[in-house]
Image (spheres, grey):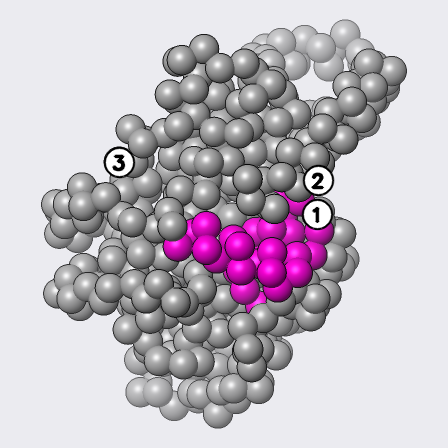
Amino acid sequence: MTTLKQKLAEKIDEQRPRIRKLVKENCSTVIDQVTVEKLFGGMRGLKCLVTDISYLDPEEGIRYRGYTLPDVFEKLPKPPGAEMPYVEGLFYLLLTGDIPTEEEVNEVIDEFRKRSILPEYVCEVIDNFPAGSHPMTIFSAAMLSMHKESLFDRGFHGGASKLDYWDPTYEDTMNILAKLPEIAAYIYTKLYHDGNRIQKDPNLDFGSNFAHMMGKDKPYDEVSRMYFILHADHESGNVSAHTGHLVSSSLADMHLSLSSMLNGLAGPLHGLANQTVLQWIMDLHKKRDGKIPSEDEMKQFVWDTLNSGQVIPGYGHAVLRKTDPRYMMQREFALRHMKDDELFKFVDLLYKVVPPILKEHGKAKNPWPNVDAHSGVIQMHYGVTEYDFYTVMFGVGRALGVSANVIWDRAMLYSIERPKSLTTDMIEEMIKKKG
Ligand code: HAX
């Protein structure tokens, strides 16, 4: 057994009695209240999910296992001479709560290498999609196509004990994650580069191998590692994480759960916003023949978007009330590596003009940029110009967090999710009775 799996097994054994005791002794303690506003408003802010993998503070932003993003980037082991840590180390942290040693990270790299052989039928699924299909649809289908490999399903139908469900769930996860860089890079080369597939390099880590198979030179490996780590998790209530959790709560296996997670991520108010941001900026770039707008012209462009009834993509958030630290980390990267990039200057100017406009507009509770406002220009700078692909990379990153959550859900024997619904008549009646 690898150190990662051994440690996970030990942590699961520690956590199980803690949860059992907590629920037994406090089963009717009230944590939050469901108001009418929350019922009709997407359950915004309702405290009704549990995860120990990450926590999103409205002011501070995301913490992975208690570590802020700057801490995560500082403490996780890095490839020699590299700026950005190994993605494998982040997965170790998400799963166990511990910062791994270099040796422990190398073990995960080795595990992924052993499990990375992609079945040919996955490429055939990708090859046979109709022209014009969105890369996220293809990605989700590629994930789904591997369902027949599920060890969890085999174990479940073979009569495995509930207490052991987490084990094949972990095995499925490792088998899937090991293949994601190649699946994503294959979708990219297939859609935009005539299927000229670049073989993976067994000597490279998760992020570097993705960069290599994308055909992008250094420092794109740094960009890839940064990107996957920044997008990995954002606690449990966002659409992709919640969908993954919900679907897996029926004991659907990891392939089904991650495919559903990807479908949720593909919505424009969620992960697809990174594509929309770039489309929006490129429209302006084209209109202005690449000339950087003045501050007043940029303000007008933002107001025109709002006045036409659209949202400003990349701005606002359901939980955050400050600039997203994932945005700031990307901004700092851009300032270090590409501060003279033409599109970065657009993004920089938007950062200056959008928040005061959204405040004046008076609707958005959070006028500040989120992760998606920045990610596209960095990809564009390093040659990934096909912006409908950006959400696929978000999906590769998000698979790390969602799968860590699902393994823990299984290990803690969490129930199938089944809240109760009411009719509008019933709600009106309840209000009348109270009033
Ligand atoms: N531009 C214009 N209006 C905005 C806005 C924005 N960026 N953000 C919020 N609003 C509006 C909402 O549409 C809503 O209007 P109505 O009352 O007319 O419905 C009002 O302000 C209140 O919304 P809110 O409470 O501040 O925000 P929500 O929690 O409802 O929604 C969203 C959060 C992220 C969906 C929202 O801010 C938005 O649409 N942003 C733009 C799209 C985007 O960037 N999405 C990515 C978010 C991060 C993420 O999940 N990444 O994957």
> What residue is pinned by disc 2?
52
In the image, is residue 200 part of the stretch drawn in magenta? no
User: Toward the viewer: 431 or 119?
Assistant: 119
Q: Is residue 212 above or below residue 175?
A: below
Marks 1/2 in contact by CB < 8 Å: the verdict is yes
Say what amino acid the circle numbered 1 marks: Gly
Q: Are marks 3 and 2 in contact (CB under 8 Å)?
A: no
Q: CB of mark 3 within 8 Å of CB of mark 1?
A: no
Q: Residues within 10 Å of mark 2 (few under 14, many from 20)?
A: some
The Cα–Cα distance between marks 1 and 2, rounded to whole angstroms, is 9 Å
Among all residues in the image, which is located at the extreme front?
1
Residue 101 falls within the magenta-colored stretch: yes
Bounds of the magenta segment: 85-113
Residue 322 % position (x, y): 71, 62
Question: Is most of the magenta stretch helix, strand or loop?
Answer: helix
Q: CA distance from mark 3 to mark 1?
A: 31 Å
Q: Which quarter of the picture shows residue 259? A: top left
Q: Tell which tag, 3 or 1, sits nearer the viewer.
A: 1
- Quadrant of the image occupied by residue 210: bottom left
Give neighbour class at mark 1: few <14, some 14-19, many 20+ (Cα, 10 Å). many
What x and y, as percent, mark residue 102?
62, 64
**For mark 3, what is the residue?**
145
Q: Which residue carries the number 1 mark? A: 97
The kind of residue on which mark 3 rests is Ser
Residue toward you, 203 or 390: 203
